Image (cartoon, coloured by chain):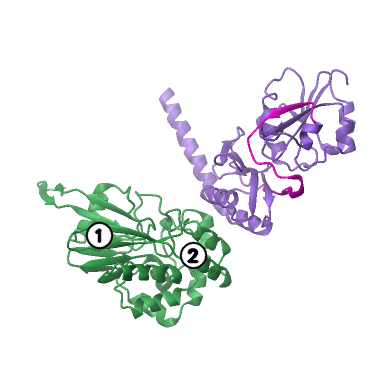
Chain colours: A purple, B green
Amino acid sequence: MDSITLTAIAGPSGSGKTTWMSQFLSNRDRPLFYCCPGMGAASVDLARIAYCFPWVHLLPEEQTPQIFAKLPDRALVYLELGFHLDLTAPLLASLPCHRVAVVPSGLQTSPWHDWADEVIFGNDIATPTPDNLPELWRSPLTGQVFDAPSLDEIAIELTEGAYGQVQRVKGIFELPDGRAFHVDFVKGLPGIEYTELGIPRWLEGRPDRFSGIEVVGWNLEKKTIAQTLLAGCLSDGAIAQYQEQYKSLMKSETNQEESILT
Amino acid sequence: MKLAVISCIHGNYEALNAVLSDIDDRKADQIYCLGDLVGYGPHPNAVVEMIRSLDIPTCQGCWDEDIVEGLNACECSYPSQLAEQRGRVAHEWTNNTIHPEVREYLATLPMTLRLDNLCFVHGSPNSQHEYLLPSMDGFAALERILSTDADVLFCGHTHVPYVRNLEDGTLTVRVQQPGKDELETQFETPLKQIVNAGSVGEPRHGRPNATYVLYDTDTAQVELREVPYDYELTCAAIIAKGLPPIFAWRLARGMEFAERADDPSHVCQR
């Protein structure tokens, strides 16, 4: 395991941990591994890494110790530690890794500073005090396809506080034209970021790939959020109708290109 | 004569009272109402009773029509599936809440009202559901006014107040029929104006304040009024009466509730 480089990244929600780490995932010179302990298999970050960097191997957290023993030479392993994890837990404390804290520049001291070997300044956001940590609510949405204007409305209402005080929203959402988007909101940063994922369009029924949402905040009205999300999801009939329209549109565009070429 | 033109009250009794007080303070001689007395808000019966008791000339809004005729609007009514579901909840609630005499009154409202060279409509002269947006094509906007034979067209429905001047000019109309010579007619149009009164009870301008318009028939001067009121009372009533709390949240932010007003090229097919 001597040739293996293990990097653990921690910091408050929205500080930019995944963004900081992502800069290293494009370099495929060494085998890359990623693990997000405490989030299970249905994590937005995990899915986003899988969609954006398909060459990165995802480590299932329940088998992490055994897999660590079998990692190939020169493996680069990134462990992303959520804000809710106790950094003094025995597993995390015993890992022989380089510890990176991604924190706002205005934060001078914190448990992340105490824990880290290296401190990186990330997004300048307000950091909750340890005695008032936010809660995390998440829901898988796999198979759901959203009416785009509804999704936009839901994102505005959610991030502007209609269903509780929200600090962070991230999610992967499917649209009826077959595209999937990563949606990212951090309180204190401008706007809601929509990024199209570079994965094939899904135009055959309900998508059989991960989508989901994670909300971090206080006094979250979870039931209402779930009901509102469902109200923005399309029925089987509507999905089929949209998919036929897009397939026909794409076919006619392809035919036009072919006729220009000939 | 000083006219006050109000629109889109949407069952918001608190907002209506505040606007009526402001109109009183401004010493308006006559009030006209452009409809949408009901829908979304918690006090549809009280609003209609107030309008009737003051004998305010009122034209029929799209929500008033929906309560009488049932929901049968074209796709322009809602910007999203979510909004449509919320609109249906509001429609059902209002439909179950209003008194029979209120429904009968709404059925009697005319589509347009006239006063000399002024015309009053809810959406457009074509339909209560059609939006005359400020960004609407100039020729289409002019056509809407010309169809009324008025110089000033007062409308609501968009929930955002504005004044649009359509400068005087020459219009050329060519009519071509098979087997006949082309017929060309030119005519001059004087300055025409569209005045949107905004919304008393469900604003969409980013603040909770009610809006309406004052118009001086002698000077043709238009004044857009914005009136603060205790919107929290309306928000509390929305929740107390079992309407979705998101209606109150949006009202408090001047975000309207649900309807569509974002496509200036759309012509309502209802």
Q: Position of residue B153 (x, y in %)?
A: 25, 60
Q: Position of residue A115 (x, y in %)?
A: 81, 32
User: Which range is magenta?
Assistant: A116-142
Say which of marks 2 and 1 sits in front: 2
- Which element type, helix, strand or loop, lies under badge 2? helix
Q: Please say if A95 is above or below B237.
A: above
Of the residues shown, which amino acid type is indicated by label 2?
A: Tyr
Q: Please say if B87 is above or below A97.
A: below
Q: Is residue B3 left or right of residue A12?
A: left
Q: Is residue B12 visible?
A: no
Q: Position of residue A149 (x, y in %)?
A: 51, 49
Q: Chain of mark 1?
A: B
Q: Position of residue A72 (x, y in %)?
A: 84, 21
Residue that numbered label 2 is attached to: B231
How far apart are the two marked residues, 2 and 1, measured between alpha carbons?
Answer: 29 Å
Q: Residues within 10 Å of mark 1 (few under 14, many from 20)?
A: many
Q: Residues within 10 Å of mark 2 (few under 14, many from 20)?
A: many
- Which element type, helix, strand or loop, lies under badge 1? strand
Residue A38 vs residue B187, the one in the foreground: A38
Magenta span contains residue B132: no
Residue that numbered label 1 is attached to: B153
Image quadrant holding the N terminus of chain A, namely top right
